[in-house]
Amino acid sequence: MPFMLYERSIKNGEEQLRYTEEKYELAGYNILYKLWKDKGSPINEGWHVSEDEMIKKRTEGKHSINDRRLLVDAAPNAKDWLEIIVIQDIWAYTFGEENSNKTEDNIVYWTPLMIGGKHVFREDYDKSPKEREQKIQNISRPNYQGDWREFLYLNGNQKGVKSPWTWGPSGRTNAAFLDPEAREYFRQYF
């Protein structure tokens, strides 16, 4: 899924979103990792980041939710429909152990995530890839409908993990098995 940074403006009383041609990365040593560090690197507990926090981290404090949006092309390979969503919240529960060496990160086993947002727009669409690309450049009057939730997970940083803080491997399923502590944490946001 392409993660895209959009400029937000109000023209004639209507919201307009324009693709900045910039991407953003949640996984790896990027937005989520940096915000986890900002929150004190919590282990065996839940933590939350808002869209505003993610935008500020991605733009190094230059922008906020007032003038940017974090959008995702939910189905970039779909040939007959187009769906753009906005990520508004991410709730995480990081499993691991505290590192006695305070100069290094805590040891992270894995981090299940509940990602929440709204649909910006969805429409049937059977145009060429070039026309599809033009369509997502400018979005007028986004409708922000329906709350959605998606569960994914990030790999940990323990020895043997080749790519710490990256998405769990894709396959037929990319399931996050939620232990009781994580389920209890996420339950409050349904």
Image: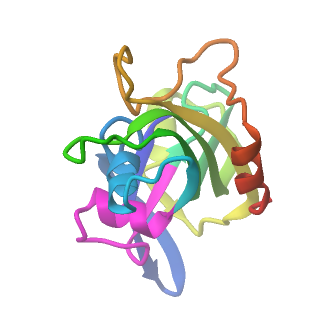
Q: Is residue 179 above or below residue 15?
A: above
* Residue drawn at (57%, 53%) of the image: 45
Q: Is residue 182 left or right of residue 72?
A: right
Looking at the image, is 186 positioned above or below residue 109? below
Residue at the spot 39% in from the left edge and 62% down from the top edge: 39
* Residue 164 at x, y percent in the picture: 36, 28
- Residue 157 screen position, x and y as percent: 38, 29
Can you give x and y, in whole percent of width and height, for residue 30 in the image? Answer: 31, 44
Quadrant in the picture for residue 77: top right
- Closer to the camera in the image, 100 or 67: 100
Give the magenta-colored segment's residue range: 49-71
- Confirm whether residue 120 shows in the render: no
Outermost residue, bottom side: 13
Left or right relative to 59: residue 73 = right
Q: Nearer the viewer, residue 39 or 84?
A: 39
Q: Up-down: is 9 above or below 68? A: below
Residue 65 is a magenta residue: yes
